[in-house]
């Protein structure tokens, strides 16, 4: 593709994200109006609508632009070793994500905690499908597929990873989820770039969401067995939002595990890159681009030509002076 086409792809990708934001704002407005009218939308339909707002425009974009899905959303098979390393990578990164989540609650509320009561009123299998599979598929198809590859047409891979992660965080439209969604977006983009497939980020996303859903049900079941009310977990999580000291204490307890987990996740990521033969390419993303020898060579001939021509003139003048002085001496 030529530069004009690449620039057009980037602009259209940005327009697609703007469309998402406008649709989300419209949905929030409709929900607000319905709430005033005492009409509440159940959590499962609301989740389906929000995820469809992400997926459907992307599919329309694919059809209108005649996009080749194999290139933009590469569902390429990965090695089994890469699969297991991806799971290990997710496990190592999880403490750091939890730390960021808790830390963000110094400035905002825990959105998931506020919705936990509604989540727990739904069948575990239904919620596991909606949040654990359907949501990750829609978001990875769009953000690590369409948006990332549209932005990467600029030729700036690292910038495409950063911006797609930023868009992924902003899509959640609240500071709490943005804080850790942005970090996860970076990890998702890097691991996909390392493997050349969208499967690793999809695996990570499904694993994270499914574990979070499962842990909510397990924790609530445990509190119910201990004599707490069915809303015990939601109440406990809501209390966390009110106590800054509690948040700082939990963040402090998570700090060391978070740093250790982050370090281990980097080691595992390097192992994935080695398995996929992409380590040098990933390293090159973080190195400042220097002029290549050919570029340096293309500049040096001009300098040497000037120096050569100046030297030739000086030599000719010197030779003329020598001849003149020799002639004067013989006379």
Image (cartoon, rainbow, N blue to C red):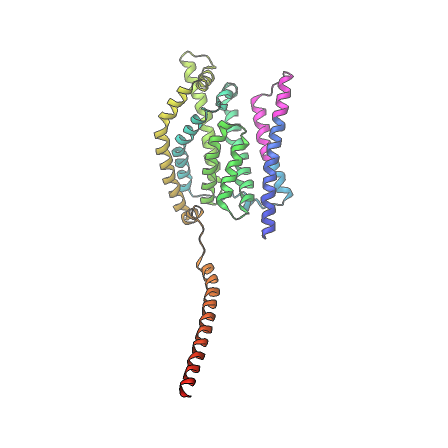
In this view of the protein, can residue 18 be seen by the observer?
yes
Residues shaded magenta: 28-56
Task: Decide if residue 29 is on the left or right side of residue 272.
Answer: right
Name which residue lies at 41% across and 41% down. 82
Magenta part mainly helix, strand or loop? helix
Q: Is residue 300 above or below residue 201?
A: below
Quadrant of the image containing the C terminus: bottom left
Name which residue lies at 61% across and 39% down. 15
Name which residue lies at 59% across and 41% down. 13
**Place of residue 87 in the rendered image (x, y in percent of width and height, measured from the top left):** 41, 36
Q: Residue 315 occupies which quadrant of the picture?
A: bottom left
Task: Decide if residue 158 is on the left or right side of residue 6.
Answer: left
Q: Residue 24 occupies which quadrant of the picture?
A: top right
In this view of the protein, can residue 75 be seen by the observer?
no
Q: Pick whichever, 129 or 25, lies toward us.
A: 25
Q: Is residue 327 above or below residue 149?
A: below
């Amino acid at each position: 593709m030529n530069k004009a086409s690449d620039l057009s792809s980037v602009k259209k990708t940005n327009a697609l994200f703007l469309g998402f934001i406008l649709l989300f704002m419209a949905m929030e407005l409709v929900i607000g109006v319905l709430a005033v009218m005492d009409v509440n939308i159940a959590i499962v339909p609301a989740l389906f609508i929000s995820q469809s707002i992400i997926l459907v425009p992307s599919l329309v974009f694919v059809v209108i632009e005649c996009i080749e899905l194999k290139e933009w959303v590469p569902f390429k098979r990965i090695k089994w070793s890469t699969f297991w390393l991806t799971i290990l990578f997710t496990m190592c990164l999880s403490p750091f994500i939890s730390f960021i989540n808790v830390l963000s609650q110094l400035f905002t509320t825990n959105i998931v905690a506020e919705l936990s009561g509604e989540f727990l009123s739904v069948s575990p299998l239904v919620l596991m499908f909606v949040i654990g599979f359907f949501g990750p598929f829609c978001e990875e198809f769009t953000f690590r597929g369409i948006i990332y590859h549209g932005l990467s047409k600029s030729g700036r891979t690292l910038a495409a990873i950063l911006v797609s992660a930023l868009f992924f965080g902003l899509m959640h439209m609240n500071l709490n989820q943005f804080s850790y969604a942005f970090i996860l977006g970076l990890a998702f983009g890097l691991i996909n770039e390392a493997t050349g497939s969208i499967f690793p980020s999809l695996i990570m996303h499904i694993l994270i969401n499914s574990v979070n859903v499962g842990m909510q049900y397990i924790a609530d079941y445990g509190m119910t067995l201990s004599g707490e009310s069915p809303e015990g977990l939601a109440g406990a999580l809501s209390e966390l939002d009110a106590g800054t000291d509690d948040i700082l204490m939990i963040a402090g307890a998570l700090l060391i595990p978070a740093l250790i987990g982050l370090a281990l996740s980097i080691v595992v990521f390097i192992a994935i890159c080695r398995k996929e033969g992409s380590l040098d390419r990933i390293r090159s993303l973080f190195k400042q681009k220097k002029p290549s020898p050919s570029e340096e060579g293309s500049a040096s001939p001009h300098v040497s030509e000037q120096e050569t021509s100046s030297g030739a003139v000086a030599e000719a003048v010197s030779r003329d002076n020598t001849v003149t002085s020799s002639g004067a001496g013989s006379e």
